[in-house]
Amino acid sequence: MNLDQLYRSLITDHAKNPRRKGLKGYPSCHLRNPSCGDEITIEALVEKGKVREVNHDGHGCSICCASASILCELTSGKSKEEVDKIIHEYYKMIQGDENLDEELLEDALALHGVAQFPARTKCATISWKALEEVLGENHES
Ligand code: ZN
């Protein structure tokens, strides 16, 4: 199995068996991508500068669903600072930057191919934008 096949199977796996799907009622943000029909809600529990838990719900194409699942798994339990860095690095990757911190991105690297399909960029970033909004509103409890 080469790297591209590995990435593709990761995306399929996350799309079919999404991690952290289902909301628990934490502060959330709902975003839609009308061009593709993607609709996603991201919620996050933030305590003392730590992103304790990130969950998602919604539906859409496999890129959208896989990226939401990967996002929630990757950011749950990290500090807000780390999450900001991960999100920044992810946007760099989607824009086609190849000088990436692979340790930060982990499974999100599977979506690096999206950079070659500008029309799908929104699918891959919608859940990340939603998390940014939730964190930006700074719902500390
Ligand atoms: Zn989509």
Image: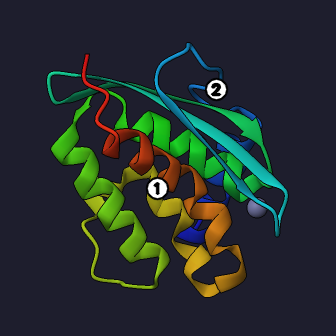
* Along the line of sight, the residue nearer the viewer: 106 or 33: 33
Q: Measured along the vertical axis of the image, is residue 128 above or below residue 120?
A: above
Q: Quadrant of the C terminus?
A: top left
C-alpha span from label 1 to label 2? 17 Å
Dot 1 and dot 2 residues touching (CB under 8 Å): no
Earlier-in-chain disc, 1 versus 2: 2
Q: Is residue 78 above or below residue 82?
A: above
Q: Give the label on residue 127, or none.
A: none
Q: Nearer the viewer, mark 1 or mark 2?
A: 2
Kindly indicate the quadrant of the structure image that contains residue 99: bottom left
Is 73 above or below relative to 84?
above
Q: Which color scheme does this rendered protein use?
A: rainbow
Q: Is residue 44 visible?
A: yes
Q: Is residue 117 visible?
A: no
Please state which amino acid type lies under the numbered disc 1.
Answer: Ala
Q: From the viewer's perspective, tell me whether residue 53 is left or right of residue 4.
A: left
Q: Position of residue 16 (x, y in %)?
A: 77, 38
Instruction: Return the x and y of residue 102 as percentages of the image width and height.
Output: 30, 63
Element at label 1 = helix
Question: Front-most of 99 and 35?
Answer: 35
**Which of the 4 quarters of the picture holds residue 51?**
top left
Which amino acid does the dot numbered 2 rest on? Answer: Lys
Quadrant hosting ligand 1: bottom right
The residue under the point 56% across, 25% down is 20
Q: Which mark is residue 108?
A: 1
Q: Secondary structure at mark 2?
A: loop
Task: Please name the residue that numbered disc 2 is placed on.
Answer: 21
Find residue 68 and report its horizontal and vertical position in percent.
58, 44
Q: Residue at x 55, y 64 (%)?
A: 111
Q: Quadrant of the N terminus?
A: bottom right
Image coordinates of residue 123 in percent, x first then y, are 67, 63
